[in-house]
Image (tube, rainbow, N blue to C red):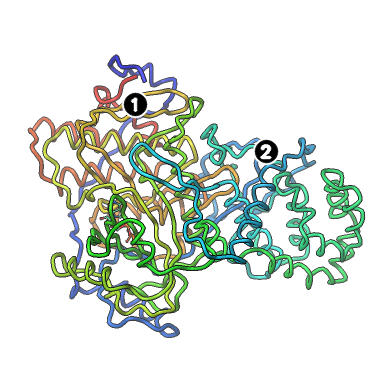
Amino acid sequence: MASSREGFAGDRWAEIASGGGAPPHARVGVVYGRRRAGDANPRDIEISGSRGENRVSFAPSKRTSWNRSLSIRGRESILLAAGENFQHQPKPRGASKKPPRQGPRGKKPAPGPPDFRKEKAYFQEVDAFELLEESPSPKNFGTWAMGAKQDYVVHDLPAILERWKLSKLAYKCGSSHPLFKIAESPIVPSLKSSTCNGSTNFVDKTPERVTKSRIYSNITYKRSITSISTDNSLSGLANHKSIVDSFDTLNIKSEVAESGGSEGLEVLGKAVEGDELEGAIKKDHVVPYLPSFGDECLSAFAQLLMVCQQSSAVSLAEVFSTYCEPSSIVKIGEGTYGEAFRAGETVCKVVPIDGDSLVNGEVQKKSEEVLEEVLLSLTLNNLRNENGKTNCRNSCKGFIETKDFRVCKGSYDAGLIGAWEDWDAKHGSENDHPKEFSEEQCYIVFVLADGGRDLESFVLSDYNEAKSLLVQVSVSLAVAESACEFEHRDLHWGNILLARNEMDTMNFTIEGKRMSARTFGLTIAIIDFTLSRINTGEAILFLDLSADPGLFEGPKGDKQSETYRKMKEITEDYWEGSFRKTNVLWLIYLVDILLLKKSFKRTAKDERDLRSFKKRLSSYESAKDCLSDSFFSDLLFT
Ligand SMILES: Nc1ncnc2c1ncn2[C@@H]1O[C@H](COP(=O)(O)OP(=O)(O)OP(=O)(O)O)[C@@H](O)[C@H]1O
């Protein structure tokens, strides 16, 4: 990073950013404060009315903040056809909510040279996992890397992604009611997994229309097999027992076995394109076999265990003892899903998963969803460029560092209960008491860096710190947007952490350009990717918020609820699409929060500047565009 500080001139930005236009009128509404227990909450009624019947719930729920929960939830994903000419174009206004099915895509591209590295890694990991199951004695299986300050576990993101993809495809093949939606287009050779291999953070853009199909018909069924057979990244799987068994039905196993490698794949490709499969499907005798392909794929829970390099779930106490003495555990925050505890130098966010009981009035997250959040976190971790790769095109440290994940089971132990009760006595928890958890309860523990205090409770000292917050959040969103079409979609003041340190700059790289932002000794960390949308280059991970109407029913005039509603307007409820403007909406929200909810030393001119910045923000289409605003001109430099 160049040390000289030059003003960040507009024409310099022209290389990176685009944007402008007349700022529309900014609306100012009444600010809504987080409600505490006792206030009426329409969402609670909805939850207990619509979902409570079949579920055991901790009763009565103390959770009353409508805006901290999703009444209906399900993370979704779309496997992408990489290598195609992805040109994102904004969805035309007035278009139907869900795009129509895409027509035929023409000839599939000629397969490139087979690359078996991913498969090798995958099977090595499967083998390692099986070995662990046989001999589960060692406790720490992770690969530990010594960071500058702290240890962190190195996770094999490509292998995790590959396993996840495989299970998705298997699910698609094996079920008439898939939970997830998968791109209809065949998966074409994907030798580049940019966010995954770390060499570059660029991903193929979301296609104009990512066409999805639920697998209701035999025809679609055929497509799904084509997807597998034409995907180089899965080519090695042609020898996987379950797949070969499936194709045995079609009498092509021996041909594949004989040909092997890419030739074998061609045989498979021809077979699935030809009449043989069509005939098989018509005779309906493929159907019973494909579920067995699914069965052999790892369940999401098993995949989570693999990510955590565990052979089985461990107790919470065991995980926490890795980081600190039980007596030193301190609860530092809570959300709808997670309880955050400081453990030594780390923060462990404990999220109950897979159980039938409602927790804090909410359905527990499922392993599948958590697995996708894990993928999301690891993709964002890559942006940190901890290895210091010089060819990294997009990097920044504005997203919380995820150090590890652990799968746990059992009730809360005394140390954690004590920490929880201390916090409750001081702050009044909105969550259910964790003593309710049974011995059978499972959890995922996100082991995170300590990001400091959330913006809601942090006391900003002056206008410089406010500007520092805005520039760092904008930069982080801009970098992640460029790297992986990231949209946070829930950047309220509980999801931005702040801490003071000695540093006065934040270095980052955006689209290959190395830059710095002035921080005035403040660092930010963006957390909580529950609602986030990302394009990993191989898949789009997103949460279908159209399934959660309650999220958009918050109080009129409340900045946070207005922001959800504006997001809905922009996306037209097509949440899988790329709408970078949602990041801008959260920046506008942040300026409002600074103006209306935070007090810090500022002059009348500072306030005017913030207000006119807010107005200009409305005209930008992405966080990257926002960086070109004059508000940042003395905060960004090369
Ligand atoms: N890495 C961290 N460092 C410091 N504090 C943290 C960290 N992670 C979480 N917290 C604290 O815990 C709170 C809850 O965390 P988080 O928002 O991730 O939980 P959640 O259940 O996913 O929340 P939500 O209700 O928004 O979905 C945060 O607002 C923050 O105060």
Q: In which quarter of the image is residue 207?
A: top right
Q: Position of residue 250 (x, y in %)?
A: 88, 63
Q: Which of marks 2 and 1 is in front?
A: 2
Q: Does the residue tagged 1 have its C-beta within 8 Å of any atom of ligand 1?
A: no
Residue 505 in percent (x, y) is at 27, 28
Residue 501 sits above or below residue 422 on the image: above
Secondary structure beneath disc 2?
A: loop
Relative to 633, does residue 229 appear above or below in the rendering? below
Residue beneath the point at 31% across and 19% down: 8
Instruction: Locate residue 342 relative to residue 408 in the image: left or right.
Output: left
Crowding at mark 1 (Cα within 10 Å: few <14, some 14-19, many 20+):
many
Residue closer to the observer: 289 or 302: 302
Q: In which quarter of the image is residue 83?
A: top right
Q: Quadrant of ligand 1?
A: bottom left
Residue 551, position as x, y percentages in the image: 36, 62
Name the element at disc 1: loop
Front-most of 213 and 347?
A: 347
Q: Residue 382 location, x and y as percent?
A: 47, 40
Question: What's under tag 1, amino acid-wise?
Answer: Ser
Residue 191 circle label: 2
The residue to which callout 1 is attached is 628
The quarter of the displayed image where residue 549 is located: bottom left
